[in-house]
Image (tube, rainbow, N blue to C red):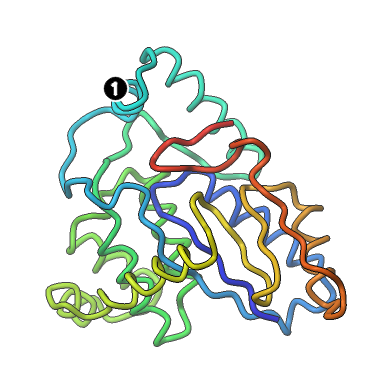
């Protein structure tokens, strides 16, 4: 079984959805036969590599709400993460651009460490307040999962894996994916959003039933997903 996951490092629900999916996968009897592939999706492709604004101020400015409203929304996301053992430090997030981070994930695929790098990037951004737009930081993340830092930095300073990121994004458009996280099961159906574990487990079991009609579990009216940089609970 093949599960393709479109997500962005800057999406808080993508980390939450990753953990909920993994928890469901651990309960799935056929987990040893499941291949997980992480696909690239940029919520803010035009974002600068350096952004000194606070996340609450940025969201308030972008969507015309107050800083207090933005903080209330983000506090709700932090509570959801904490229930899964994830620590989100929104007050010290370093905003930037995720393109090179996606390239690093493709680099890691060549060494069967795609999932490990994805996890390390999420932790670096949400928990450790690292600048994942910085090439040296990305090199350190590569090293933390057993990859060669100098080799990672060398490719990051080249054009390598840029096409792979764009191909993932083109494939997302073909699937009609406009928000993340989105999970595509065996090219048959998709589950959108950081759904509860039982929903993911149901999807895993359904993916085994080749003769059943397709099923789309959409994003619950925009909840627990990020769309164009906007994340709602």
Q: Secondary structure at mark 1?
A: helix
Rendering quarter of residue 221? top right
The x, y position of residue 106, in whole percent, is 37, 76
Vertical arrangement, residue 168 with respect to residue 81, above or below: below
Q: Position of residue 43 (x, y in %)?
A: 37, 49
Residue 40 in the image, given as x and y percentages of width and height? 41, 65
Task: Give the left or right position of residue 79, taking residue 68 as reference.
Answer: right
Residue 78 visible? The answer is no
Query: 193 and 76: which one is in front?
Result: 193
Residue on which disc 1 sits: 61
At 51% from the left edge and 40% from the top edge, which residue is drawn? Answer: 87
Please tell me which residue lies in front, 145 or 117.
Answer: 117
Q: Is residue 190 above or below residue 181?
A: below
In-front residue for pair 111/87: 111
Residue shown at the point (13%, 78%) measured from the top left = 158
Q: Position of residue 197 (x, y in %)?
A: 76, 52
Q: Considering only vertical position in the picture, is 131 above or below 65?
A: below
């Amino acid at each position: 079984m093949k599960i393709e996951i479109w997500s962005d490092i800057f999406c808080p629900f993508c980390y939450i959805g990753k953990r909920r999916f993994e928890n469901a996968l651990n309960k799935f009897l056929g987990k040893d036969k499941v291949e997980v592939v992480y696909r690239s999706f940029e919520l803010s492709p035009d974002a600068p590599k350096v952004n000194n604004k606070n996340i609450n101020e940025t969201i308030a400015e972008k969507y015309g709400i107050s800083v207090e409203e933005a903080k209330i929304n983000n506090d709700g996301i932090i509570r959801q993460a904490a229930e899964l053992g994830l620590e989100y430090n929104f007050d010290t997030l370093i905003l930037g651009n995720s393109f090179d981070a996606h390239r690093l994930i493709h680099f890691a695929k060549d060494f069967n460490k795609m999932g490990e790098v994805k996890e390390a990037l999420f932790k670096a951004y949400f928990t450790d307040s690292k600048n994942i737009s910085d090439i040296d930081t990305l090199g350190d993340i590569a090293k933390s999962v057993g990859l060669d830092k100098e080799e990672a930095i060398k490719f990051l300073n080249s054009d390598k894996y840029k096409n792979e990121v764009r191909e993932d994004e083109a494939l997302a458009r073909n699937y009609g994916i406009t928000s993340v996280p989105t999970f595509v099961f065996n090219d048959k159906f998709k589950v959108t959003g950081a759904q509860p574990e039982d929903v993911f487990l149901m999807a895993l079991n359904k993916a085994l039933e080749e003769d059943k009609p397709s099923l789309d579990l959409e994003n619950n009216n925009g909840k627990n997903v990020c769309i164009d940089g906007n994340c709602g609970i």
